[in-house]
Amino acid sequence: MAFTKSTLISLFTLAAVGTVGAAAQNPNCATGGGFVGHAFPFNRTSLPDDFIPCGGNCPPPSPFTLPIALPSDLFKGADVCCSTFTLTFNGRTAQGTYAYKSSSRAGTQNLALDEDLFDKLGGDVTIGELFPVKYCL
Ligand SMILES: *[C@@H]1O[C@H](CO)[C@@H](O)[C@H](O)[C@H]1NC(C)=O
């Protein structure tokens, strides 16, 4: 079987497009699905016992890097530790940074949000829960 030059170019183009698409987005986001869970506030100076750092050297909390705890089993690897992503609730959006794994949330899509981030989404820390919070990693 003989490949023509144009056949080879097509094959390389397909391979390149496939790679870029896979690297750019989590499959959950590509289908518009993402994750949906309950979000609860936490106090970053007094972390819950089940939190462990995700493993990276995350930026200090700032208005766009407020810490988030994800279920400890949501990521199998540490490659996305400290990534920043967007959360939406009831028409509001805010960005936060994945900084902790929460073992008590394993098996769910629930989040814990720094109180300032919880506040940005319109949450009341005295009530303490928002649902449905949507996010795409
Ligand atoms: C967060 O925890 C610290 C240390 O326990 C405490 O001093 C502070 O008042 C707490 N903040 C809130 C908003 O509860």
Image (cartoon, helix red, strand yellow):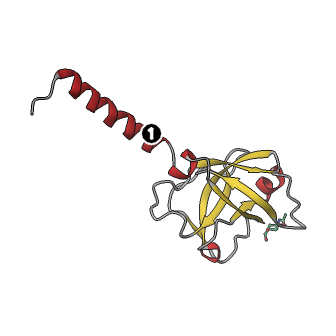
Quarter holding residue 71:
bottom right
Q: Quadrant of residue 6?
A: top left
Q: Where is residue 17 in the image (x, y as percent from the top left)?
A: 38, 34
Q: Position of residue 85 (x, y in %)?
A: 63, 48
> Which residue corresponds to mark 1?
21
**Image quadrant of ligand 1?**
bottom right
Q: In percent of the image, x 46 and y 60: which residue is there? A: 78
| Residue 101 occupies quadrant | bottom right
Q: Looking at the image, which residue is at 82% across and 66% down? A: 129
Q: Type of residue at label 1? A: Gly
Residue at 76% x, 59% y is 132
Left or right of residue 88, residue 81 in this image: left
**Image height of 38 relative to 58, above or below:** below
Q: What element carries label 1?
A: helix
Q: Nearer the viewer, residue 35 or 85?
A: 35
Up the image or down, 107 lies above or below 14; here it is below
